[in-house]
Amino acid sequence: MKNKSKKRFLNKKNKTLKRKGKNSCDHFCKNDYSPEIEKQFKKIAKENKLPYKPRKEDRKFRITACKQNFCNEGCKGYKFFSKEEENNFKKNINGNFSKKTKPKIIEKIKSKGAISYCDDNGYDPFHK
């Protein structure tokens, strides 16, 4: 009987260890970023007296966009209309973060599990 309980403990321990890195960033996108952006959309819709019912595709797109912005080491994979636009983007990236991002915001985003912040998209890491 003790072996089973010990085995369960080890499995639980291993799962928590796996949450570091990419998995914690995925967790950030699903449990922090996406709900917060959805609240912002609902608020805007309510202010304009419009209905807002997100579809499954909307949520999936939001998660993908989050991963592109917050789980993207080196901020790679963006598409640009011109070489000049691409060069300007690369000049404004320092490691995994936009140079325009304040250190307090970077620290807060990192504490939530993100590993990059390539482009300011209106997300407020200090919500609630």
Image (tube, rainbow, N blue to C red):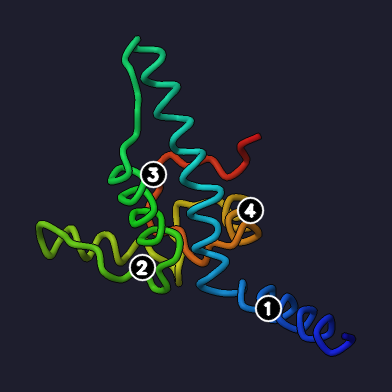
Is residue 122 found left or right of 124 in the rendered image? left
Q: CA distance from mark 3 to mark 4?
A: 16 Å
Going by the numbered disc 2, the residue's amino acid type is Cys
In the visual, does 74 lie left or right of 110? Answer: left
Q: Tell me the distance, in whole angstroms, between the alpha carbons under discs 3 and 2.
A: 14 Å
Q: Are marks 2 and 4 in contact (CB under 8 Å)?
A: no
Check if mark 1's residue and mark 2's residue have beta carbons within 8 Å. Answer: no
Q: Which structural element holds mark 2?
A: loop
Residue at numbered disc 2 = 75
- Location of residue 66 by image quarter: bottom left
The mark closer to the camera, 3 or 1, is 1
- Residue occupying image coordinates x 87% and y 85%: 1
Mark carried by residue 121: 3
Q: Which residue sits at x=54%, y=56%?
A: 28
The residue at which mark 1 appears reads as 17
What is the spatial separation of the Cα atoms under label 2 and label 4, in whole angstroms? 19 Å
The outermost residue toward the left is: 82
- Nearest to the eye among marks 1 and 2: give it: 1
Distance between the alpha carbons at the discs numbered 3 and 1: 30 Å
Label 3: how many residues lie within 10 Å, few (<14), some (14-19) or many (20+)? Answer: few
Q: Where 18 sits versus 71, above or below?
A: below
* Residue that appears at 31% across and 38% down: 55
Q: Which residue is mark 4?
A: 108
